[in-house]
Amino acid sequence: MSSKLKDLPIGVQTFEKIIKNDFIYVDKTKDIFNLVKNQSGVYFLSRPRRFGKSLLVSTLEAIFKNERELFKGLWIDGSDYEWKEYPVIKLDISATDKDTVEDFQEGLKRALVKVAAKYDLSLGNFTPSVMFSDLINLLARKYETKVVVLVDEYDSPIIKHINNHETALQMRDALHDFYSTMKSEDANIRFVLLTGVSKFARTSIFSGLNNLKNISMQEEYSSIVGITQEELEANFAEYLERVANKLKLSSEELLKQVKYWYNGYRFSKSEMKVYNPFSTLSFLDSKEFNNFWFDTGTPTYLVNLIKRDGPSAELFKERIDMSSDLLSTYDTQSLPLIPIMFDTGYLTIKDYSVRNNLSSYELTYPNFEVKYSLNSCLLPAFTERPSDQVSIQVMKISSAILSNQLEDFMNLLKNYFASIPYELIPVKTLNEKYFHLIFYLLMRVTGFRVNVEDRTSSGRIDLVLENDTDVYIFEFKVDQPARVALEQIKEKKYYEKYLNIQVEKQYGTGIKKIHLVGISFSTAERNISEYLVEGYN
Protein backbone atom coordinates (compact mmCIF):
# COMPACT_ATOMS: atom_id res chain seq x y z
CA MET A 1 0.00 0.00 0.00
CA SER A 2 1.32 3.44 -0.87
CA SER A 3 2.03 5.77 2.04
CA LYS A 4 0.49 8.77 0.30
CA LEU A 5 -3.08 8.55 -0.93
CA LYS A 6 -4.83 10.98 -3.18
CA ASP A 7 -6.98 13.34 -1.13
CA LEU A 8 -10.72 12.86 -0.85
CA PRO A 9 -12.67 15.67 -2.61
CA ILE A 10 -15.03 16.33 0.31
CA GLY A 11 -17.05 19.43 -0.50
CA VAL A 12 -14.96 20.17 -3.62
CA GLN A 13 -17.38 21.07 -6.41
CA THR A 14 -14.97 22.38 -9.05
CA PHE A 15 -13.69 19.86 -11.61
CA GLU A 16 -10.54 21.84 -12.38
CA LYS A 17 -9.62 22.00 -8.69
CA ILE A 18 -10.09 18.24 -8.29
CA ILE A 19 -7.82 17.44 -11.25
CA LYS A 20 -5.11 20.04 -10.66
CA ASN A 21 -4.89 19.29 -6.93
CA ASP A 22 -4.83 15.54 -7.56
CA PHE A 23 -7.98 14.67 -5.63
CA ILE A 24 -9.64 11.34 -6.34
CA TYR A 25 -12.06 11.78 -9.24
CA VAL A 26 -14.70 9.15 -9.95
CA ASP A 27 -14.81 9.17 -13.74
CA LYS A 28 -18.33 10.06 -14.87
CA THR A 29 -17.32 11.23 -18.34
CA LYS A 30 -18.81 8.22 -20.13
CA ASP A 31 -22.27 9.20 -18.84
CA ILE A 32 -21.54 12.86 -19.57
CA PHE A 33 -20.54 11.96 -23.13
CA ASN A 34 -24.08 10.69 -23.71
CA LEU A 35 -25.30 14.19 -22.89
CA VAL A 36 -22.85 16.21 -24.96
CA LYS A 37 -22.34 14.02 -28.05
CA ASN A 38 -25.39 15.44 -29.84
CA GLN A 39 -25.20 18.84 -31.51
CA SER A 40 -27.96 20.25 -29.34
CA GLY A 41 -29.91 19.34 -26.23
CA VAL A 42 -31.85 20.83 -23.34
CA TYR A 43 -31.72 18.67 -20.22
CA PHE A 44 -33.02 18.70 -16.68
CA LEU A 45 -31.66 16.63 -13.76
CA SER A 46 -33.13 16.41 -10.28
CA ARG A 47 -31.05 14.95 -7.44
CA PRO A 48 -30.87 15.41 -3.64
CA ARG A 49 -28.56 18.02 -2.14
CA ARG A 50 -24.85 17.27 -1.73
CA PHE A 51 -25.08 14.59 -4.41
CA GLY A 52 -22.62 15.95 -6.98
CA LYS A 53 -24.84 18.14 -9.16
CA SER A 54 -22.51 21.13 -8.91
CA LEU A 55 -19.49 19.01 -9.81
CA LEU A 56 -21.38 17.71 -12.85
CA VAL A 57 -22.08 21.29 -13.94
CA SER A 58 -18.43 22.22 -13.42
CA THR A 59 -17.27 19.21 -15.46
CA LEU A 60 -19.58 20.18 -18.32
CA GLU A 61 -18.21 23.72 -18.16
CA ALA A 62 -14.65 22.39 -18.56
CA ILE A 63 -15.69 20.23 -21.52
CA PHE A 64 -17.43 23.05 -23.35
CA LYS A 65 -14.56 25.43 -22.66
CA ASN A 66 -12.35 22.86 -24.43
CA GLU A 67 -10.09 22.32 -21.42
CA ARG A 68 -9.13 18.90 -22.75
CA GLU A 69 -5.85 18.76 -20.83
CA LEU A 70 -7.86 18.30 -17.63
CA PHE A 71 -9.39 15.10 -19.01
CA LYS A 72 -6.20 13.20 -19.76
CA GLY A 73 -6.71 9.55 -18.89
CA LEU A 74 -10.48 9.89 -18.44
CA TRP A 75 -12.99 8.01 -20.58
CA ILE A 76 -14.09 10.95 -22.69
CA ASP A 77 -10.50 11.76 -23.72
CA GLY A 78 -10.37 8.49 -25.66
CA SER A 79 -13.82 8.88 -27.19
CA ASP A 80 -14.82 10.39 -30.51
CA TYR A 81 -16.19 13.53 -28.86
CA GLU A 82 -15.52 16.56 -31.07
CA TRP A 83 -13.67 18.98 -28.79
CA LYS A 84 -14.58 22.59 -29.47
CA GLU A 85 -14.72 25.74 -27.39
CA TYR A 86 -18.06 27.42 -26.67
CA PRO A 87 -18.94 30.47 -24.58
CA VAL A 88 -20.55 29.24 -21.36
CA ILE A 89 -23.14 30.95 -19.19
CA LYS A 90 -22.97 29.22 -15.82
CA LEU A 91 -25.40 30.37 -13.14
CA ASP A 92 -25.63 29.12 -9.56
CA ILE A 93 -29.13 30.18 -8.56
CA SER A 94 -28.53 29.14 -4.94
CA ALA A 95 -25.92 31.92 -4.66
CA THR A 96 -28.42 34.71 -5.46
CA ASP A 97 -30.34 36.70 -2.88
CA LYS A 98 -33.77 35.15 -2.33
CA ASP A 99 -35.43 36.95 0.56
CA THR A 100 -37.88 38.68 -1.79
CA VAL A 101 -38.66 38.46 -5.48
CA GLU A 102 -37.13 41.90 -5.96
CA ASP A 103 -33.92 40.76 -4.26
CA PHE A 104 -33.85 37.65 -6.39
CA GLN A 105 -34.25 39.55 -9.65
CA GLU A 106 -31.48 41.95 -8.66
CA GLY A 107 -29.33 38.94 -7.81
CA LEU A 108 -29.96 37.46 -11.25
CA LYS A 109 -28.92 40.74 -12.85
CA ARG A 110 -25.66 40.78 -10.92
CA ALA A 111 -24.95 37.17 -11.86
CA LEU A 112 -25.49 37.93 -15.57
CA VAL A 113 -23.31 41.04 -15.41
CA LYS A 114 -20.56 38.95 -13.79
CA VAL A 115 -20.68 36.38 -16.62
CA ALA A 116 -20.66 39.14 -19.24
CA ALA A 117 -17.60 40.75 -17.64
CA LYS A 118 -15.64 37.49 -17.99
CA TYR A 119 -16.09 37.82 -21.74
CA ASP A 120 -15.41 41.59 -21.78
CA LEU A 121 -19.04 42.37 -22.50
CA SER A 122 -21.40 44.85 -20.88
CA LEU A 123 -25.16 44.62 -20.35
CA GLY A 124 -27.80 47.29 -19.92
CA ASN A 125 -29.87 47.46 -16.75
CA PHE A 126 -33.09 45.80 -17.90
CA THR A 127 -35.18 42.93 -16.57
CA PRO A 128 -33.31 39.65 -15.93
CA SER A 129 -35.05 38.06 -18.94
CA VAL A 130 -33.99 40.82 -21.32
CA MET A 131 -30.43 40.82 -19.96
CA PHE A 132 -30.26 37.02 -20.31
CA SER A 133 -31.38 37.24 -23.93
CA ASP A 134 -28.91 40.04 -24.64
CA LEU A 135 -26.05 38.07 -23.12
CA ILE A 136 -26.79 35.00 -25.26
CA ASN A 137 -26.95 37.17 -28.38
CA LEU A 138 -23.77 39.07 -27.61
CA LEU A 139 -21.81 35.89 -26.93
CA ALA A 140 -23.09 34.16 -30.06
CA ARG A 141 -22.12 37.15 -32.23
CA LYS A 142 -18.74 37.73 -30.60
CA TYR A 143 -17.57 34.13 -30.88
CA GLU A 144 -19.59 33.20 -33.97
CA THR A 145 -20.78 30.01 -32.36
CA LYS A 146 -23.61 28.77 -30.21
CA VAL A 147 -23.77 29.28 -26.45
CA VAL A 148 -23.89 26.76 -23.59
CA VAL A 149 -26.15 27.46 -20.60
CA LEU A 150 -25.59 25.67 -17.28
CA VAL A 151 -27.96 26.43 -14.40
CA ASP A 152 -27.26 24.89 -10.99
CA GLU A 153 -29.97 24.66 -8.29
CA TYR A 154 -32.62 26.17 -10.56
CA ASP A 155 -35.32 25.80 -7.89
CA SER A 156 -33.57 27.19 -4.79
CA PRO A 157 -35.77 30.35 -4.59
CA ILE A 158 -38.90 28.16 -4.43
CA ILE A 159 -37.36 25.69 -1.97
CA LYS A 160 -36.42 28.57 0.32
CA HIS A 161 -40.06 29.70 0.47
CA ILE A 162 -41.75 26.34 0.07
CA ASN A 163 -43.81 26.91 3.23
CA ASN A 164 -44.75 30.46 2.18
CA HIS A 165 -47.24 29.88 -0.62
CA GLU A 166 -47.51 33.46 -1.87
CA THR A 167 -43.75 34.07 -2.09
CA ALA A 168 -43.16 30.62 -3.60
CA LEU A 169 -45.63 31.44 -6.41
CA GLN A 170 -43.92 34.78 -7.04
CA MET A 171 -40.56 33.03 -7.28
CA ARG A 172 -42.06 30.44 -9.61
CA ASP A 173 -43.37 33.14 -11.94
CA ALA A 174 -40.02 34.96 -11.90
CA LEU A 175 -38.19 31.72 -12.78
CA HIS A 176 -40.68 30.99 -15.55
CA ASP A 177 -40.07 34.38 -17.17
CA PHE A 178 -36.31 33.95 -16.87
CA TYR A 179 -36.04 30.40 -18.22
CA SER A 180 -38.52 31.09 -21.04
CA THR A 181 -35.86 33.34 -22.56
CA MET A 182 -34.06 30.24 -23.80
CA LYS A 183 -36.93 29.33 -26.11
CA SER A 184 -36.62 32.54 -28.11
CA GLU A 185 -32.83 32.10 -28.22
CA ASP A 186 -32.94 28.45 -29.29
CA ALA A 187 -31.04 29.14 -32.53
CA ASN A 188 -28.10 30.52 -30.52
CA ILE A 189 -27.95 27.71 -27.94
CA ARG A 190 -25.75 24.61 -28.21
CA PHE A 191 -26.56 22.91 -24.90
CA VAL A 192 -28.57 23.51 -21.72
CA LEU A 193 -28.53 21.69 -18.38
CA LEU A 194 -30.63 22.71 -15.41
CA THR A 195 -30.17 20.94 -12.07
CA GLY A 196 -32.15 21.12 -8.89
CA VAL A 197 -33.68 19.20 -6.02
CA SER A 198 -37.32 19.25 -7.13
CA LYS A 199 -39.30 18.44 -10.25
CA PHE A 200 -41.80 21.29 -10.33
CA ALA A 201 -44.27 21.07 -13.19
CA ARG A 202 -42.98 21.98 -16.63
CA THR A 203 -46.20 23.85 -17.27
CA SER A 204 -45.45 26.25 -14.44
CA ILE A 205 -41.71 26.87 -14.91
CA PHE A 206 -40.45 25.25 -18.12
CA SER A 207 -43.44 25.75 -20.40
CA GLY A 208 -41.25 27.78 -22.73
CA LEU A 209 -38.78 24.93 -23.16
CA ASN A 210 -40.70 22.58 -25.41
CA ASN A 211 -37.67 20.43 -26.15
CA LEU A 212 -36.67 19.97 -22.51
CA LYS A 213 -35.62 16.39 -21.73
CA ASN A 214 -36.03 15.33 -18.12
CA ILE A 215 -33.30 12.75 -17.45
CA SER A 216 -33.92 12.53 -13.70
CA MET A 217 -35.46 9.05 -13.86
CA GLN A 218 -33.93 7.75 -17.10
CA GLU A 219 -32.00 4.50 -16.77
CA GLU A 220 -28.95 5.59 -18.77
CA TYR A 221 -28.34 8.48 -16.35
CA SER A 222 -29.14 6.65 -13.11
CA SER A 223 -25.51 6.85 -11.94
CA ILE A 224 -24.38 10.12 -13.56
CA VAL A 225 -23.94 11.42 -9.98
CA GLY A 226 -23.42 9.33 -6.87
CA ILE A 227 -20.99 6.43 -6.42
CA THR A 228 -21.73 2.91 -7.64
CA GLN A 229 -20.54 -0.19 -5.81
CA GLU A 230 -17.97 -0.83 -8.54
CA GLU A 231 -16.71 2.77 -8.37
CA LEU A 232 -16.43 2.61 -4.57
CA GLU A 233 -14.28 -0.51 -4.60
CA ALA A 234 -12.16 0.58 -7.59
CA ASN A 235 -11.44 4.18 -6.57
CA PHE A 236 -11.26 3.94 -2.79
CA ALA A 237 -9.72 0.50 -2.17
CA GLU A 238 -6.84 1.79 -0.04
CA TYR A 239 -9.12 4.03 2.04
CA LEU A 240 -11.47 1.08 2.61
CA GLU A 241 -8.55 -1.06 3.73
CA ARG A 242 -7.41 1.58 6.22
CA VAL A 243 -10.92 1.92 7.64
CA ALA A 244 -11.28 -1.86 7.93
CA ASN A 245 -8.02 -2.04 9.86
CA LYS A 246 -9.05 0.74 12.23
CA LEU A 247 -12.51 -0.72 12.90
CA LYS A 248 -11.10 -4.27 13.04
CA LEU A 249 -13.50 -5.52 10.39
CA SER A 250 -12.96 -7.82 7.45
CA SER A 251 -13.25 -6.27 3.98
CA GLU A 252 -16.53 -8.09 3.43
CA GLU A 253 -18.03 -6.94 6.72
CA LEU A 254 -16.91 -3.34 6.16
CA LEU A 255 -18.48 -3.21 2.67
CA LYS A 256 -21.67 -4.63 4.12
CA GLN A 257 -21.79 -1.91 6.77
CA VAL A 258 -20.95 0.92 4.35
CA LYS A 259 -23.73 -0.26 2.03
CA TYR A 260 -26.18 -0.41 4.95
CA TRP A 261 -25.36 3.16 6.00
CA TYR A 262 -24.84 5.06 2.74
CA ASN A 263 -25.96 3.07 -0.33
CA GLY A 264 -29.50 2.44 -1.57
CA TYR A 265 -30.34 5.45 -3.76
CA ARG A 266 -32.16 4.31 -6.88
CA PHE A 267 -33.42 6.87 -9.38
CA SER A 268 -34.91 4.81 -12.24
CA LYS A 269 -36.51 1.54 -13.28
CA SER A 270 -32.99 0.17 -13.50
CA GLU A 271 -31.87 -1.64 -10.37
CA MET A 272 -28.70 0.47 -10.27
CA LYS A 273 -28.14 1.88 -6.79
CA VAL A 274 -25.62 4.51 -5.76
CA TYR A 275 -23.98 5.75 -2.60
CA ASN A 276 -24.45 9.24 -1.25
CA PRO A 277 -21.07 10.74 -2.26
CA PHE A 278 -20.82 13.31 0.53
CA SER A 279 -21.55 10.82 3.30
CA THR A 280 -19.34 8.12 1.80
CA LEU A 281 -16.34 10.41 1.40
CA SER A 282 -16.86 11.84 4.89
CA PHE A 283 -16.96 8.32 6.31
CA LEU A 284 -13.76 7.30 4.53
CA ASP A 285 -12.11 10.44 5.89
CA SER A 286 -13.27 10.14 9.52
CA LYS A 287 -13.18 6.31 9.58
CA GLU A 288 -16.36 6.37 11.66
CA PHE A 289 -19.99 5.73 10.80
CA ASN A 290 -22.04 8.86 11.31
CA ASN A 291 -24.93 10.91 9.90
CA PHE A 292 -22.82 13.19 7.72
CA TRP A 293 -25.33 14.15 5.02
CA PHE A 294 -28.12 15.00 7.43
CA ASP A 295 -25.83 17.13 9.60
CA THR A 296 -25.13 19.47 6.67
CA GLY A 297 -28.61 20.96 6.85
CA THR A 298 -31.81 20.52 8.83
CA PRO A 299 -34.74 19.98 6.43
CA THR A 300 -37.04 22.51 8.13
CA TYR A 301 -39.32 22.81 5.11
CA LEU A 302 -39.74 19.03 4.98
CA VAL A 303 -40.59 18.84 8.68
CA ASN A 304 -43.17 21.58 8.17
CA LEU A 305 -44.71 19.71 5.22
CA ILE A 306 -44.96 16.55 7.29
CA LYS A 307 -46.57 18.47 10.14
CA ARG A 308 -48.92 20.11 7.61
CA ASP A 309 -50.23 16.71 6.50
CA GLY A 310 -50.86 15.69 10.09
CA PRO A 311 -49.12 13.09 12.23
CA SER A 312 -49.37 9.65 10.69
CA ALA A 313 -47.00 6.72 10.96
CA GLU A 314 -48.15 5.64 7.51
CA LEU A 315 -45.62 8.09 6.09
CA PHE A 316 -42.82 6.02 7.58
CA LYS A 317 -43.76 2.54 6.46
CA GLU A 318 -41.06 0.37 4.94
CA ARG A 319 -42.86 0.60 1.60
CA ILE A 320 -45.00 3.36 0.11
CA ASP A 321 -46.74 2.93 -3.23
CA MET A 322 -46.80 5.87 -5.63
CA SER A 323 -47.90 6.25 -9.25
CA SER A 324 -45.22 7.23 -11.75
CA ASP A 325 -47.17 10.36 -12.76
CA LEU A 326 -47.08 11.77 -9.24
CA LEU A 327 -43.36 11.16 -8.96
CA SER A 328 -42.47 12.77 -12.26
CA THR A 329 -43.79 16.30 -11.69
CA TYR A 330 -45.79 18.53 -9.35
CA ASP A 331 -46.49 22.22 -8.81
CA THR A 332 -45.89 24.76 -6.07
CA GLN A 333 -49.63 24.95 -5.49
CA SER A 334 -50.00 21.32 -4.41
CA LEU A 335 -46.63 20.27 -2.90
CA PRO A 336 -47.38 16.57 -2.34
CA LEU A 337 -45.28 15.26 0.53
CA ILE A 338 -44.20 11.84 -0.77
CA PRO A 339 -42.82 13.03 -4.17
CA ILE A 340 -40.94 15.82 -2.39
CA MET A 341 -39.47 13.31 0.06
CA PHE A 342 -38.36 11.27 -2.95
CA ASP A 343 -36.77 14.21 -4.76
CA THR A 344 -34.98 15.43 -1.66
CA GLY A 345 -33.48 11.99 -0.96
CA TYR A 346 -35.49 10.87 2.08
CA LEU A 347 -37.24 8.18 0.05
CA THR A 348 -35.98 6.18 -2.90
CA ILE A 349 -37.19 3.55 -5.36
CA LYS A 350 -37.42 0.03 -4.00
CA ASP A 351 -39.32 -1.55 -6.86
CA TYR A 352 -41.12 -0.74 -10.12
CA SER A 353 -44.17 -2.47 -11.58
CA VAL A 354 -46.78 -2.17 -14.31
CA ARG A 355 -50.34 -3.31 -13.65
CA ASN A 356 -53.29 -2.79 -15.96
CA ASN A 357 -51.05 -0.61 -18.15
CA LEU A 358 -50.40 1.73 -15.22
CA SER A 359 -46.86 2.06 -13.87
CA SER A 360 -46.12 2.59 -10.21
CA TYR A 361 -43.17 2.71 -7.85
CA GLU A 362 -42.65 1.26 -4.41
CA LEU A 363 -40.65 3.68 -2.27
CA THR A 364 -38.63 3.16 0.89
CA TYR A 365 -35.82 4.72 2.93
CA PRO A 366 -32.52 4.65 1.01
CA ASN A 367 -30.39 3.56 3.96
CA PHE A 368 -29.87 3.63 7.70
CA GLU A 369 -28.37 7.13 7.73
CA VAL A 370 -31.50 8.67 6.26
CA LYS A 371 -33.94 6.53 8.21
CA TYR A 372 -32.34 7.20 11.59
CA SER A 373 -31.56 10.87 11.01
CA LEU A 374 -34.98 11.85 9.69
CA ASN A 375 -36.77 10.21 12.58
CA SER A 376 -34.34 11.79 15.04
CA CYS A 377 -35.22 15.17 13.55
CA LEU A 378 -38.98 14.61 13.55
CA LEU A 379 -39.29 13.42 17.13
CA PRO A 380 -38.25 16.76 18.71
CA ALA A 381 -40.32 18.59 16.07
CA PHE A 382 -43.53 16.74 16.94
CA THR A 383 -43.03 16.91 20.70
CA GLU A 384 -41.17 20.23 21.05
CA ARG A 385 -38.59 18.71 23.34
CA PRO A 386 -34.90 19.68 23.04
CA SER A 387 -32.83 17.24 21.03
CA ASP A 388 -30.41 16.58 23.89
CA GLN A 389 -33.28 15.62 26.21
CA VAL A 390 -34.72 13.34 23.56
CA SER A 391 -31.33 11.67 23.10
CA ILE A 392 -31.02 10.95 26.84
CA GLN A 393 -34.52 9.48 26.96
CA VAL A 394 -33.86 7.35 23.88
CA MET A 395 -30.68 5.93 25.46
CA LYS A 396 -32.66 4.90 28.54
CA ILE A 397 -35.37 3.30 26.41
CA SER A 398 -32.75 1.42 24.37
CA SER A 399 -31.14 0.14 27.54
CA ALA A 400 -34.48 -1.11 28.87
CA ILE A 401 -35.17 -2.96 25.61
CA LEU A 402 -31.71 -4.55 25.56
CA SER A 403 -32.11 -5.80 29.13
CA ASN A 404 -35.73 -6.86 28.49
CA GLN A 405 -36.97 -4.70 31.37
CA LEU A 406 -40.48 -4.11 30.01
CA GLU A 407 -41.79 -2.41 33.14
CA ASP A 408 -38.97 0.15 33.00
CA PHE A 409 -39.57 0.45 29.26
CA MET A 410 -43.25 1.29 29.72
CA ASN A 411 -42.56 3.74 32.54
CA LEU A 412 -40.07 5.58 30.34
CA LEU A 413 -42.66 5.76 27.55
CA LYS A 414 -45.28 7.12 29.96
CA ASN A 415 -42.83 9.75 31.16
CA TYR A 416 -42.11 10.78 27.60
CA PHE A 417 -45.79 11.15 26.63
CA ALA A 418 -46.41 13.06 29.86
CA SER A 419 -43.66 15.54 28.97
CA ILE A 420 -45.24 16.54 25.64
CA PRO A 421 -46.72 20.05 26.00
CA TYR A 422 -50.49 19.85 26.50
CA GLU A 423 -51.26 22.44 23.82
CA LEU A 424 -49.14 20.60 21.24
CA ILE A 425 -51.24 17.44 21.21
CA PRO A 426 -53.92 17.78 18.49
CA VAL A 427 -57.23 17.47 20.34
CA LYS A 428 -59.36 17.22 17.19
CA THR A 429 -57.24 14.45 15.71
CA LEU A 430 -56.22 12.75 18.95
CA ASN A 431 -56.50 9.14 17.89
CA GLU A 432 -54.54 5.96 17.49
CA LYS A 433 -52.49 7.44 14.63
CA TYR A 434 -51.07 10.22 16.78
CA PHE A 435 -49.99 7.92 19.58
CA HIS A 436 -48.77 5.43 17.01
CA LEU A 437 -46.57 8.06 15.35
CA ILE A 438 -44.84 9.22 18.55
CA PHE A 439 -44.37 5.63 19.68
CA TYR A 440 -42.97 4.70 16.26
CA LEU A 441 -40.51 7.61 16.16
CA LEU A 442 -39.25 6.76 19.64
CA MET A 443 -38.70 3.15 18.66
CA ARG A 444 -37.06 4.07 15.38
CA VAL A 445 -34.39 6.27 16.92
CA THR A 446 -33.38 3.48 19.30
CA GLY A 447 -31.60 1.96 16.32
CA PHE A 448 -33.41 -1.38 16.56
CA ARG A 449 -35.23 -2.88 13.61
CA VAL A 450 -38.74 -1.42 13.51
CA ASN A 451 -41.55 -2.18 11.10
CA VAL A 452 -44.80 -0.25 11.11
CA GLU A 453 -48.07 -1.85 9.96
CA ASP A 454 -46.24 -5.06 9.15
CA ARG A 455 -48.29 -7.21 6.76
CA THR A 456 -49.24 -10.77 7.61
CA SER A 457 -51.68 -13.19 5.99
CA SER A 458 -54.32 -12.25 8.58
CA GLY A 459 -53.84 -8.49 8.83
CA ARG A 460 -51.37 -5.75 9.69
CA ILE A 461 -49.42 -5.58 12.91
CA ASP A 462 -49.29 -2.06 14.31
CA LEU A 463 -45.59 -2.20 15.11
CA VAL A 464 -42.82 -4.78 15.40
CA LEU A 465 -39.53 -4.08 17.19
CA GLU A 466 -36.71 -6.56 16.78
CA ASN A 467 -33.27 -6.66 18.35
CA ASP A 468 -30.61 -9.37 18.24
CA THR A 469 -32.34 -11.66 20.73
CA ASP A 470 -36.02 -10.67 20.99
CA VAL A 471 -39.08 -9.73 18.92
CA TYR A 472 -41.75 -7.40 20.36
CA ILE A 473 -45.14 -7.35 18.63
CA PHE A 474 -47.23 -4.29 19.55
CA GLU A 475 -50.92 -3.66 19.00
CA PHE A 476 -52.42 -0.28 19.97
CA LYS A 477 -55.93 0.67 21.03
CA VAL A 478 -57.34 4.03 22.08
CA ASP A 479 -59.85 4.20 24.95
CA GLN A 480 -60.18 0.42 24.95
CA PRO A 481 -58.78 -2.15 27.38
CA ALA A 482 -55.27 -3.43 26.68
CA ARG A 483 -56.62 -6.97 26.64
CA VAL A 484 -58.51 -6.14 23.42
CA ALA A 485 -55.21 -5.31 21.73
CA LEU A 486 -53.50 -8.39 23.15
CA GLU A 487 -56.33 -10.69 22.08
CA GLN A 488 -56.15 -9.31 18.55
CA ILE A 489 -52.49 -10.30 18.33
CA LYS A 490 -53.31 -13.82 19.47
CA GLU A 491 -56.49 -14.28 17.44
CA LYS A 492 -54.85 -13.15 14.21
CA LYS A 493 -51.66 -15.04 15.05
CA TYR A 494 -49.42 -12.09 14.23
CA TYR A 495 -46.56 -13.93 15.92
CA GLU A 496 -46.43 -16.73 13.31
CA LYS A 497 -44.34 -14.64 10.94
CA TYR A 498 -41.61 -14.39 13.60
CA LEU A 499 -41.44 -17.96 14.82
CA ASN A 500 -38.11 -19.78 14.80
CA ILE A 501 -35.90 -16.78 13.96
CA GLN A 502 -32.35 -17.69 14.88
CA VAL A 503 -30.45 -15.60 17.42
CA GLU A 504 -27.31 -13.94 16.07
CA LYS A 505 -24.29 -16.19 16.62
CA GLN A 506 -22.47 -13.77 18.93
CA TYR A 507 -25.45 -13.84 21.29
CA GLY A 508 -25.56 -17.62 21.67
CA THR A 509 -27.66 -20.32 20.07
CA GLY A 510 -31.42 -20.74 19.95
CA ILE A 511 -34.34 -18.76 18.58
CA LYS A 512 -35.51 -15.24 19.33
CA LYS A 513 -38.04 -14.80 22.13
CA ILE A 514 -41.38 -13.34 21.09
CA HIS A 515 -43.24 -10.85 23.32
CA LEU A 516 -46.87 -9.93 22.65
CA VAL A 517 -47.65 -6.40 23.88
CA GLY A 518 -51.11 -4.82 23.99
CA ILE A 519 -51.14 -1.09 24.73
CA SER A 520 -54.10 1.14 25.53
CA PHE A 521 -53.85 4.92 25.06
CA SER A 522 -56.22 7.26 26.84
CA THR A 523 -57.38 10.42 25.09
CA ALA A 524 -58.36 11.88 28.47
CA GLU A 525 -54.94 11.25 30.00
CA ARG A 526 -53.13 11.70 26.68
CA ASN A 527 -50.88 8.87 27.65
CA ILE A 528 -50.54 5.11 27.97
CA SER A 529 -53.25 4.05 30.40
CA GLU A 530 -52.67 0.29 30.44
CA TYR A 531 -50.52 -2.41 28.92
CA LEU A 532 -50.36 -6.20 28.97
CA VAL A 533 -47.44 -8.42 28.00
CA GLU A 534 -47.33 -12.12 27.26
CA GLY A 535 -44.46 -14.27 26.08
CA TYR A 536 -45.23 -16.65 23.27
CA ASN A 537 -42.27 -19.01 23.34
Image (cartoon, rainbow, N blue to C red):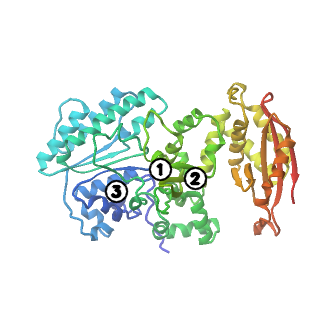
Q: Is residue 82 visible?
A: yes
Q: Amino acid at mark 2?
A: Thr
Distance of mark 3 from mark 1, alpha carbons? 34 Å
- Residue 130 placement (x, y as % from top left): 21, 33
- Residue 346 placement (x, y as % from top left): 54, 48
**Residue 531, image quadrant:** top right
Element assignment for label 2: strand
> Residue visible at 55% across and 46% down?
295
First of labels 3, 1 by sequence position? 3
| Tag 1 residue | 324
Q: Is residue 190 above or below residue 204?
A: below
Could you classify mark 2 by the number of other residues whose Cα lies within 10 Å: few (under 14), some (14-19), or many (20 or more)? many
Side of 417 where 333 appears, left or right: left
Given residues 244 and 333, the one toward you in this image is 333
Side of 440 where 105 appears, left or right: left
Q: Quadrant of the C terminus?
A: bottom right
Given residues 318 and 324, the one toward you in this image is 324
Distance of mark 1 from mark 2, alpha carbons? 15 Å
- Residue 15's disc number: 3
- Residue 349's disc number: none
Could you classify mark 1 by the number of other residues whose Cα lies within 10 Å: few (under 14), some (14-19), or many (20 or more)? some
> Residue visible at 81% across and 55% down?
493
| Tag 2 residue | 364
Give the number of the mark in front: 3 or 2: 2
Please identify the residue farthest to the top as the structure is shown.
423
- Residue 315 placement (x, y as % from top left): 61, 43
